[in-house]
Image (cartoon, rainbow, N blue to C red):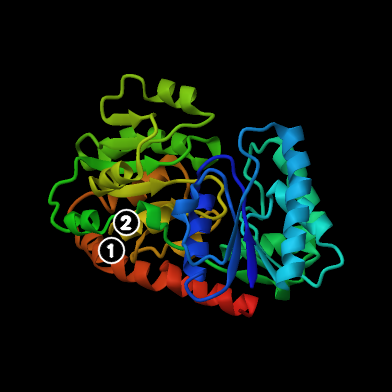
Amino acid sequence: MLLTSVTFKGRNAIGDGYKDIVNTLSEQYAVAAVLPNAYSPEEFSEKIKLSFPDPFADCGKIRSAVRAIGFAWKLRNVVREQNIRKVFLYFDADWLNLFLVLMFRGLPIEYYVFVHDPILHSGEKLEFILRRWLVARLLFSRARKLFVSFSQGKRDLVSRYAVDPERVSVVFLPELTCLQFPELRDSEKKLGNYPFDLMFFGRLETYKGWRLLVDCLDLLKQKVGRDVTLLVIGRGTDTAEFKRAIAGCSTVRYIEDYIENRQLAEYIIQSRVIVLPYLDATGTQTVQTANYYNKPVVVSSAGCFSDYVISGVNGVVVDDLTPEGLAEAIVRLLPESEYYASIKRHVSSHFEETFRLNKILVQLVTEMGL
């Protein structure tokens, strides 16, 4: 039996990805799963052999630590009683991992750990930096395998934490099924005109390069000979600054409020190109979602993008990450051209070959020796 774990107080892409992986694994393998409290038990498969809702909802840091000790001890007893030998931790910097490693000492456990951020994003809080340091000290050396979602991440992990490269495997992040609506995907093929030329979605943080996108709008107008429309969905620490930057700009539509997954998918369909000009990045599932809906992406070469995007196949990778360089890349996809049409023909097959969950799980299962 495999024990899997991740805990979050809110829903996010990591939690969504964990749910997909655990539900699919349980179809063929005996799985005991920690269920993050932001998700209802009904969202997880009935085929999961044992499930343990995490106890960290609605409590502060001190109470969470106390509960983590008791919860980790409970899981230790389960591991012993069920003779569990493999533990899959889907988020390396989860506080619970530290307690599990301490409580599981003395047990013949093989740890398999997904390291989502080998290099921390710029602007990370001190608490998260401390958590990563502790996890690296306690967990990285004990893990049988460490998984990262992109090639540069492996190199970063090996160089920064002196990890044996043989213990690190690159496993791409798969599709997110919660953002997939097949009937909407089919409708995209029939759509002739797009209300929005460009779309950016996700948290508004400095490292995601939204300033570059705003700064290149005037350049795009000069190159295309018309206004270029941009849809931005999301909020974050830069929300106020972003609002000031687009004040008076009639070609930018900004949606700050939370929207449901289906509505997000509808907006993706209404956009011609998805633009992700990240200044630094680790893994992402935005490319997968855009490509699922047959949308080309314009991305920087940061983090996973150089692995996930092939220029001319499922998008364009921007090497010159300046307003001018970004505008040059976007212009190639705005008019009805053979280049744009060629990418549209290849996006779907690239998605099927690269991002399908079942294909990626075959690699995970093999690496864990299930």
Q: Which mark is residue 296?
A: 2
Q: Position of residue 308 (x, y in %)?
A: 46, 63
Relative depth, front residue between 18 and 192: 18
Q: Position of residue 215 (x, y in %)?
A: 40, 33
**Residue 144 seen:** no
Q: CA distance from mark 2 to mark 1?
A: 7 Å
Name the amino acid type tagged 1: Ile
Question: Which image quadrant for residue 160?
Answer: bottom right
Left or right: where 152 falls relative to 221: right
Q: Are marks 2 and 1 in contact (CB under 8 Å)?
A: yes
Q: What's under tag 2, amino acid-wise?
A: Pro
121 up-or-down from 75: above or below: above
* Residue 51 to residue 334: above or below: below
Q: Is residue 247 above or below residue 75?
A: above
Q: Earlier in the sequence, mark 2 or mark 1?
A: 2
Say which residue appears at 36% left-offset and 52% top-offset.
179
Q: Which of the image's four quarters has the N terminus?
A: bottom right
Task: For residue 23, say whether it is visible.
Answer: yes
Q: Say which residue appears at 20% left-offset and 55% top-offset.
A: 188
283 to the left or right of 54: left
Q: Name the residue carrying label 1.
A: 343
Is residue 238 toward the left or the right of residue 2 in the image?
left
Residue 209, percent across and down?
48, 40
Determine which of the numbered discs, if any, sits on residue 367 in the image.
Answer: none
Instruction: Residue 316: give x, y in percent of width and height.
Output: 37, 57
